[in-house]
């Protein structure tokens, strides 16, 4: 179970970063982004530091407000956020067609929520122990049904060619500085004829690069989600093909979702099922973090983390048609 209490949130801010260094880490992280004078080239050149800092800083907030699975999902009416997320993960497992004894790679598993759920769904034994690794970067690649956790950069994986029977990624390869290099590395370690399935963060056709308001929203989304850049769906598909994949299926799953994918972040939407991410829940969290930081129970800089996450949530609602987190891709090596 995820840690979800107020003191768990406070004690977890910073992950592997020393508590006295949290504020300076926040400041350095912010400076990578356009909103604070940074640029895309700098983010890409320093992607490991940027993404590691991001997840060390925000993981406890995600667990507190979102649970163990840090991603969005197409949502049906009457369905809770967690129900939709679980259904989303089961769908991905079915696309992979997992079988007993296979080696499957989760590219960027975070604290392992989706990985554990997919393993349970397919009737396999737990892929991780109960001792979660808080602050694990989404730049890491981890095993499913292989009973091993390997903390490596998924841009440079130390695995032999043709190692895995299947690979999946859920809103993780968006952190890669170069999408072609990322897909090429995945192609290399995947056995021939096997499946790679993923959900990508992408810019949609509603995004206008000449529109300053659109650019502002994009920059705030990148700041609040640890992204070097947000690519278009077309760029991702082209990169997959150049890497050697045969694309079997691709679609924006958000386009025909009964409810908007970003609804849980909408200030005007109230939900008892996911109260902590509503406007009222955010207000309580904001003031709780302020008090905890004042009392020294949360490290200095915690309020700034909470603030850029709120900024990103609002930007995602504003740009909900211009950005999708649900570009589904299924392809064969």
Image (spheres, rainbow, N blue to C red):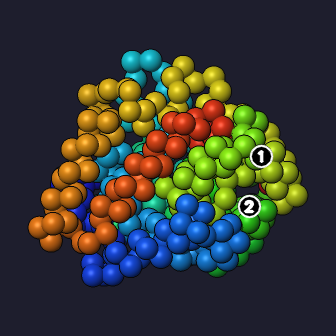
For residue 71, the mark is none
Q: Nearer the viewer, residue 236 or 279?
A: 279
Instruction: Tally the marks.
Output: 2
Placement of 210 over or under 144, stated as above or below: above
Placement of 157 over or under 122, stated as above or below: below
Residue at screen point 46% across, 42% down? 314
Task: Name the mark nearer the viewer: 1 or 2.
Answer: 1
SS at circle 2: helix
What residue does disc 1 label?
Answer: 210
Quadrant of residue 37 within the rendered picture: bottom right
The residue at the far front in this view is 212
Give x and y (percent) for residue 111: 40, 60
What residue does disc 2 label?
Answer: 179
The residue at the far left in this view is 295
Quarter containing the C terminus: bottom right
Placement of 4 over or under 177, stated as above or below: above
Give x and y (percent) for residue 4: 23, 51
Going from the N terminus, do you reach mark 1 or mark 2 first?
A: 2
Give x and y (percent) for residue 151: 50, 74
291 relative position to 271: left or right: left
């Amino acid at each position: 179970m995820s840690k979800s209490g107020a003191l768990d949130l406070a004690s977890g801010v910073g992950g592997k970063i020393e508590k006295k260094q949290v504020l300076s880490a926040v400041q350095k992280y912010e400076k990578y982004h356009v909103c604070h004078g940074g640029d895309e080239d700098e983010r890409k050149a320093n992607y490991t530091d940027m993404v590691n800092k991001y997840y060390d800083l925000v993981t406890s907030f995600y667990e507190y407000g979102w649970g163990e699975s840090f991603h969005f999902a197409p949502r049906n009416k009457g369905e809770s956020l967690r129900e939709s997320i679980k259904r989303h993960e089961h769908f991905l497992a079915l696309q992979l067609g997992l079988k007993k004894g296979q080696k499957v790679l989760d590219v960027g598993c975070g604290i392992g929520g989706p990985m554990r759920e997919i393993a349970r769904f397919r009737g396999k034994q737990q892929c991780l122990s109960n001792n979660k690794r808080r602050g694990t970067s989404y730049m890491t690649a981890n095993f499913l049904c292989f009973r091993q956790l390997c903390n490596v950069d998924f841009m440079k994986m130390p695995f032999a060619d043709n190692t895995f029977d299947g690979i999946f990624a859920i809103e993780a390869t968006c952190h890669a500085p170069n999408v072609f290099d990322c897909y090429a590395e995945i192609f290399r370690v995947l056995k021939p004829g096997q499946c790679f399935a993923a959900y990508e963060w992408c810019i949609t056709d509603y995004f206008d690069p000449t529109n300053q308001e659109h650019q502002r929203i994009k920059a705030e989304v990148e700041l609040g989600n640890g992204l070097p850049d947000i690519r278009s769906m077309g760029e991702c598909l082209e990169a997959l093909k150049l890497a050697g994949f045969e694309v079997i299926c691709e679609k924006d799953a958000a386009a025909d979702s009964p409810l908007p994918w970003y609804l849980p972040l909408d200030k005007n939407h109230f939900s008892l099922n996911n109260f902590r991410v509503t406007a009222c829940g955010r207000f309580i969290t904001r003031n709780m973090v302020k008090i905890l930081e004042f009392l020294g129970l949360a490290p200095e800089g915690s309020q700034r983390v909470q603030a850029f996450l709120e900024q990103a949530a609002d930007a995602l609602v504003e740009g909900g048609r211009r950005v999708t987190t649900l570009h589904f891709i299924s392809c064969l090596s």
